[in-house]
Amino acid sequence: MQVRVLGIVLAGGKGTRLFPLTKERAKPAVPFGGKFRIIDFVLSNFINSSIYSVYVLTQFRSQSLLQHLSEGWQFGSLLKSQFLIPVPAQMRSQEEQWYQGTADAIYQNINLVEQSDPQVVAIFGGDHVYRMNIASMVEYHLQKGAEVTVAAIPAPREEAAAFGVIESDKDGRILAFHEKNPDAPSMPGDDTRVFASMGNYIFSTRTLLRLLHEDAAEPDSHHDFGHDILPKLAGKGEIYAYDFQTNRIPGEPADSEPYWRDVGTIDAYYEANMDLRAVKPALKLYNREWPLRTSSFPDPPAKFAFDDEHRRGHAIDSIISGGCILSGGIVRNSILGRNVRVHSGAVIEDCVILDNCDIGRRARLKRTILDKNVRVPEDGVIGYDLERDRANHHVTDSGIVVVAGYRSKVGITALVV
């Protein structure tokens, strides 16, 4: 890629709908798929697209995220154009306050854009699960001579109220934005779907700086790209929609459909994890031409112990991460994070188990998410009696039980059920 691109990842959201997984961490830091964090997807997309100058803007409950970035991503370089640097909220506004919106987050760090002097700026969210060749979107932006390009994906019309919906002409030029409007217009030629903004933007640098200064001077603005800046530009400036369905990833068949999930709720997070278990998953983790990068830990291989008739450790249609030991337990249709212990007689079905959990003998878990470091005692049962579970844990409307850890006096997280 010849054009100079600066990447900025917005990673400061609270992620309140993912509670209790976001009780002690920012949404981008939530573990996913056994060994990854949600933010690994956008960062891998940048690096795999040969965009090596990236700032990560953090804010709420950022310690876990900052630790992950320091452990998993190399910062600094001998080359000025290569870096991946986390930027805590600097409170550079006159009121010295937290970011008020996505545009304000960039405005409070506008000095980073000016110092980098890129030709275009790629502003992406850090809280979605997807793979994307960002270089293709940059090329589209340049070919169109666009000032702003917005990544968009078709969504069912009945979900229009959950998205910022784009109204565009046949050439992709954006005519209007409809923010979470159930009556937003459908896609041209398709009455069943709307064109939903993914919250990923490419800006020509001069346009970005001008728009940020104008918005900062507007006292009634929410200082948000989707709510304020882009709707004012639609139909007037050179602003285009990039159809994510046209995006192709090296190393995959040409007819592969791009994968993108907004894991903003517990149910969506759970289903996205479950997507990984398929024989031919929509989200492929095994493409060596487009690796998903993350922290590297010195974990030993997973181990399956015992081969007795009533004591055999095995896993079926599941993902088992490094350091796990299945000692006579059964795991079906589940995702196990790093260093999980499953003891004899335990049965885990349709679950997402995060790092360092311990499942006691004869325990039974079904449609359950265990946060990190949780210990389920012998004969513990979760996910079979939802009324009982609601008295102790968070249970979604669809019946997924989320178990948070409880810190003991000696610093060991334990669960009593």
Image (tube, rainbow, N blue to C red):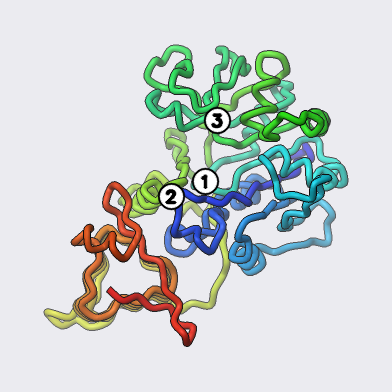
Q: Which residue is drawn at the image coordinates 32% and 51% (left, top)? A: 396
Alpha carbon separation for disc pair 1 and 3: 13 Å
In this figure, which residue is indicated by the disc labeled 2?
284
Horizontal relation, residue 47 to residue 281: left or right: right
Residue located 47% across and 15% down the image: 185
Image quadrant occupied by the C terminus: bottom left
Residue type of the residue flagged with mark 1: His
**Badge 3: few (under 14), some or many (20 or more) residues near its Cα, within 10 Å?**
many
- Amino acid tagged 3: Ser
Q: Residue 9: image x %, image y %?
A: 66, 47
Residue 302 at least partly seen: no
Q: Residues within 10 Å of mark 1 (few under 14, many from 20)?
A: many
Q: CA distance from mark 1 to mark 2?
A: 15 Å
User: Looking at the picture, does residue 360 appear above or below residue 315?
Assistant: below
Disc 1 on helix, strand or loop?
A: loop
Task: Name the quadrant of the N terminus.
Answer: top right
Q: Secondary structure at mark 3?
A: strand
Residue located at (43% from left, 49% from top): 284
* Residue 197 - label: 3
Residue 128 marker: 1
Question: Which mark sits nearer the N-terminus, 3 or 2?
Answer: 3
Per the image, label 2 sits on a secondary structure element best described as loop
Judged left or right of residue 337, residue 318 is left
- In the image, residue 263 lies at what x, y percent? 45, 46
